[in-house]
Image: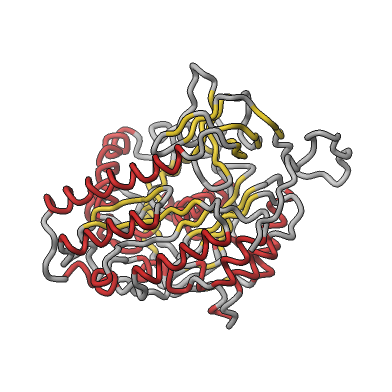
Amino acid sequence: MTQGPRSYVIRTYGCQMNVHDSERIAGLLERAGYVRACGPDAADLVVFNTCAVRENADNRLYGTLGHLYPVKQRRPEMQIAVGGCLAQKDRSTVLERAPWVDVVFGTHNLASLPVLLERARHNREAQVEIVEALQQFPSELPTHRESPFSAWVSISVGCDNTCTFCIVPSLRGKETDRRPGDVLAEVRALVEEGVVEITLLGQNVNSYGRSFGDRFAFGKLLRACGEIDGLERVRFTSPHPRDFTDDVIAAMAQTPNVMPHLHMPLQSGSDAVLKAMRRSYRAERYLGILDKVRSAMPEAAITTDIIVGFPGETEADFAATLEVVAAARFAGAFTFQYSQRPGTPAASMAAQVPKAVVQERYERLVAAQDDIAWEGNKALVGQQVQVLVSTGEGRKDEVTGRVSGRARDGRLVHVAAAAAPGDTVVTTVSHAAPHHLIADGGLTAHRRWRGPMSPTAPAAPAGGGGRALLTIAPRRG
């Protein structure tokens, strides 16, 4: 009897970079003959693409591996692979804690996975391969994207910053930038495949160009993306305040398909804590950037990351963070309780803040930010928003027939509409909550996603056919 193709499932933890890496892993596996499985219990291969930024990432991984142990005992032919940042950090420790794992691979050698899996099967022995330097830029690898209309595009990998709480530079390596021509070629190819939204990825997109000596390269890249026909939305993550320059703000404001949304990590509003974090900017500098962004783009939504309870943080330091949050008026914030990460300078710092104190401050921060976000969302009630429907995030309300998607400014919107993923709709906000908007007032416009562009496709009919839904007036810089 001929055995069918082996099936796989990938579980991804962590940031957008990890999500993009998982798409590459899926592409590699499918090129090697694997097919996607319905779930881990039925899969011949389970791949964990891990994160190492927070302590609970370790606990989550090893807990899940423990749950898979009985499945592995029942089905010894099933393989388990662990990759990503935690694998790069823990290396052989993964096998010490979970000896039923078959393959451990790092952040720099994704392409090795199919060979390592075959070697583990042939030798009946676990394989560990961790390399210290990037072997192949991820975008050169095959991919299986989760979305046919939205895509990640890496412009750099690695990071040259030395934030004392972060382990990423030691796991991802020094920053390596792609040439602009290579990035734009990938974007154009994606648009030909039907992609209407791209997100430019880098650990620090504002330092893009350092590798080839052009400190204004990122602003130029944004403007070049604006010249690509069929590309309707451009986003990027994450910028660092230290390297944020006025030319990037101007490029955002003057390029119509660059979305009016900025996600820029604050981490702390205390200058003393920022210094201890080695963040190389201070609260005044951070708020000054926000003022410039809002002057150029009054409609822009700004979101951030904040760490509570960094070693040595006093009540006065935390009060300073609350003051900056109140001044910044963030549309949303990812808030984190500090956790010690072995291998980072902060892990050995004195004056670690007690857990109970961190928890109490965290709850105060979340409550304050929720109030600010809710107030900002309420101000949008009655206004029109353009939404790219995804339905894969948030919720889909079966009772009212709502679908979910993102407005141009990045806000999550639940829309009462018979729209499919990839469709773009214009609607009016009818209700606001702290973390989302609801639009139940009907559609002003609806453009259905048409998939890959065809050079022989008929001309779009007047009134909304084709790839462009609206003519969006350029913002004034």
Q: Please give the name of the residue rendered at 67% of the width and 67% of the height, measured from the top-left corner.
A: 182
Does the image show residue 91?
A: no
**Residue 294 against residue 34 in the figure, above or below:** below
Where residue 190 appears, as percent x and y from the top left, is 68, 52
**Residue 319 against residue 446 in the figure, above or below:** below
Residue 360 left/right relative to 396: left
Q: Please give the name of the residue rendered at 27% of the width and 39% of the height, measured from the top-left corner.
A: 69
**Residue 285 against residue 62 in the figure, above or below:** below
Residue 315 left/right relative to 13: left
Residue 410 left/right relative to 347: right
Where residue 242 appears, as percent x and y from the top left, is 43, 73
Q: Nearer the viewer, residue 351 or 244?
A: 244
> Dividing the picture into quarters, in which one does residue 146 lie?
top right
> Dividing the picture into quarters, in which one does residue 68 lie?
top left
Where residue 151 appears, as percent x and y from the top left, is 59, 50
Where residue 241 appears, as percent x and y from the top left, is 43, 69
Q: Please give the name of the residue rendered at 15% of the width and 60% of the height, measured from the top-left corner.
A: 315
Residue 44 left/right relative to 248: left
User: Coloured how?
Assistant: secondary structure
Q: Please give the name of the residue rendered at 60% of the width and 37% of the height, measured from the top-left corner.
A: 384
Q: Nearer the viewer, residue 473 or 200?
A: 473
> Dividing the picture into quarters, in which one does residue 60 lie?
top left
Please state, as top left, top right, bottom left or bottom right, where the C terminus lies in the image.
Answer: bottom right
Total numbered circles: 0
Q: Nearer the viewer, residue 122 or 225?
A: 225
Please state, as top left, top right, bottom left or bottom right, where the N terminus lies in the image.
Answer: top right
